[in-house]
Amino acid sequence: MMDWCEYFYTIKRVCPWSWASWQKGLIEIDSWQGHPKQLGNLDARVYTAPKRKYRILKKIAKRMNDKFPNEEWLWSHPDFGNNSTEVPVLIQQDRAKLEQARRNSPF
């Protein structure tokens, strides 16, 4: 089972806003059921998608980005190492909040 607190802490050098959001309870972890939920007040939702190959996650993320222009969908897969998640995931974020965080990022 993945330790999400540790994960967000370890990626804070490349994604500092995710650690801050995690600490504030603004990131929810859920399992992918084939359709997204509304983000509401969350900064992001991470959907675990065990047994999904990265090519499938990439296709789903593209489809969600096309369908929901106010959101940004990303994916992560353990096959890619480095800052990747230990389990396959889809990541749903509010596009405007994410772009603001990127503008304010020192990276």
Image (spheres, rainbow, N blue to C red):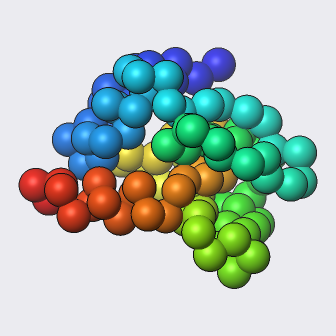
Of all residues, the one furthest to the front in this rendering is: 41
Rendered image quadrant of residue 9: top left
Residue drawn at x 31%, y 42% is 17
Quadrant assignment for the C terminus: bottom left
Rendered image quadrant of residue 55: bottom right
The image shows residue 100 at horizontal and vertical percentages of: 30, 60
Q: Is residue 72 visible?
A: yes
The image shows residue 77 at horizontal and vertical percentages of: 58, 51
Query: With respect to residue 47, does 35 lie above or below?
Result: below
Rendered image quadrant of residue 8: top left
Residue drawn at x 41%, y 55% is 97
Query: With respect to residue 12, does 76 lie above or below?
Result: below
Q: Nearer the viewer, residue 70 or 2?
A: 70
Residue drawn at x 25%, y 48% is 14
Query: With respect to residue 84, does 6 lie above or below?
Result: above
* Horizontal side of residue 15 vs 75, given as left or right: left
Query: With respect to residue 101, does 65 lie above or below?
Result: below
Residue drawn at x 36%, y 47% is 82
The image shows residue 63 at horizontal and vertical percentages of: 75, 76
Q: Is residue 89 visible?
A: no
Quadrant assignment for the N terminus: top right
Q: Nearer the viewer, residue 34 or 52?
A: 34
